[in-house]
Image: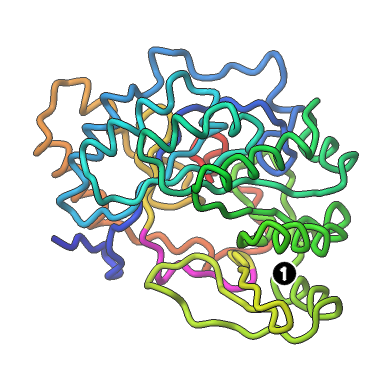
């Protein structure tokens, strides 16, 4: 079955946030001035359980679901996260299971994650310079902790990608070191324009380094770049090749080159709300339906109704002034 929204976009990907907590305090996601020791995270009873997540997946699989991504917060701080991976794999042997993580707990967990059925991992890394890394993450971790996690995943045979958010006057000077490290590892990197997700990251258009600007910097260092064709409908990153290196990498350009027209992703927040857009202000409470002892068919029907009425295209309609909006925080919905 193919489930389309009101603009003809199919449901293909489900991103599931398993926690609203994180061991980093990156300023574009969870700035410490808002997420400090006094901040009230979701209590345990409001967090969606693994069994409830499986009910949602079971309800969505017949609707055309092809990929699942586990996110957070930081998913590896959720207890027994490999148990969830195993439960998903037992539900469907073919579905693609990925995880987005900051990487510092990867080495500790990677073997069990692989054994449980994880296919891919995306690691967030915004700087190779250690001092800048600690400034961005506002943590006591070091770059080597993330690199060690990446190396552990590579050693385990798990496919790896690196995601880097680039912000003006912060880390645009890290473009070249990041791409050089990715070439060394022979893993693709995706550079992400700083996005107005949530209302606490002090986003403004002047802080955005566009994909075009990034490519100019990379071209000056490495020579000619050639854009590749998309691999599939709904691919988020625009793919490019450094000819002299025969190295492929990408750009996620939500600000300068929106891709709403091919978005196939739904998101489940850590308290069980379904969001049809990363920039949503409000989700749909699926968890309450589940906790009323709903059948899988009831949950599936609710998902169908929500997706059928979906008409989100915020990035295409974005205005310079977003002050009036109160969108959901990235740490709550997952990236």
Dot 1: what SS?
loop
Q: Residue at x 56, y 73 (%)?
A: 238
* x then y, percent, for residue 181: 76, 57
Q: How is the image coloured?
A: rainbow
* x then y, percent, for residue 258: 54, 70
Q: Residue at x 59, y 73 (%)?
A: 257
Q: Residue at x 78, y 55 (%)?
A: 167
So how many labels did they put on this image? 1
Q: Nearer the viewer, residue 57 or 202?
A: 57
Asked if the stretch drawn in magenta spans residue 156, the answer is no
**32 with respect to 316 (left or right):** right
In this view, 91 is above or below 35: below
The quadrant the N terminus occupies is bottom left
In this view, 75 is above or below 62: above
Q: Which of the 4 image quadrants contains residue 5?
A: bottom left
Question: Crowding near pointer 1: few (<14 within 10 Å), some, many (20+)?
Answer: many
Residue under label 1, please give it. Answer: 210
* x then y, percent, for residue 54: 25, 32
Q: Nearer the viewer, residue 175 or 3?
A: 175
**164 with respect to 270 (left or right):** right
- Range covered by the magenta-colored residues: 256-264
Q: Residue at x 49, y 65 (%)?
A: 236
**What's the magenta bit mostly, secondary-structure-wise?**
loop
Asked if the stretch drawn in magenta spans residue 262, the answer is yes
Q: Nearer the viewer, residue 142 or 269?
A: 142
Q: Which of the 4 image quadrants contains residue 308?
A: bottom left
**72 with respect to 25 (left or right):** left
* x then y, percent, for residue 325: 57, 47
């Amino acid at each position: 079955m193919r489930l389309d929204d009101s603009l003809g976009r199919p449901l293909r990907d489900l991103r599931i946030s398993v926690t609203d907590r994180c061991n980093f305090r990156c300023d574009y996601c969870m700035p410490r001035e808002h997420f400090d020791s006094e901040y009230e995270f979701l209590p345990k009873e409001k967090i969606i359980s693994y069994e409830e997540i499986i009910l949602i997946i079971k309800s969505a699989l017949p609707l055309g679901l092809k990929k699942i991504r586990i996110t957070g917060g930081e998913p590896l701080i959720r207890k027994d996260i490999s148990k969830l991976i195993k439960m998903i794999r037992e539900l469907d042997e073919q579905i693609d299971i990925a995880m987005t993580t900051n990487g510092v707990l990867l080495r500790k967990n990677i073997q069990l994650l692989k054994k449980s059925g994880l296919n891919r991992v995306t690691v967030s890394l915004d700087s190779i310079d250690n001092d800048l890394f600690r400034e961005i993450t506002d943590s006591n971790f070091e770059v080597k902790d993330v690199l060690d996690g990446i190396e552990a995943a590579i050693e385990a045979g798990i496919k790896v990608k690196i995601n880097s958010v680039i912000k003006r006057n912060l880390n645009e000077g890290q473009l070249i070191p990041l791409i050089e490290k990715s070439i060394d590892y022979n893993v693709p990197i995706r550079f992400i324009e700083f996005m107005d997700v949530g209302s606490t990251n002090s986003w403004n258009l002047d802080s955005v380094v566009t994909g075009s600007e990034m490519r100019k910097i990379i071209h000056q260092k490495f020579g000619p770049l050639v854009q590749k064709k998309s691999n599939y409908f709904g691919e988020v990153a625009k793919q490019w090749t450094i000819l002299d290196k025969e190295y492929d990498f990408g750009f996620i350009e939500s600000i300068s080159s929106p891709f709403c027209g091919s978005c196939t992703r739904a998101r489940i927040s850590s308290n069980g709300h379904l969001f049809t857009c990363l920039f949503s202000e409000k989700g749909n409470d699926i968890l309450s339906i589940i906790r009323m002892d709903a059948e899988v068919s009831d949950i599936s029907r609710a998902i169908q109704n929500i997706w059928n009425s979906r008409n989100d295209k915020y990035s295409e309609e974005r205005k310079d002034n977003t002050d009036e909006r109160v969108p959901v925080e990235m740490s709550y919905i997952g990236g």
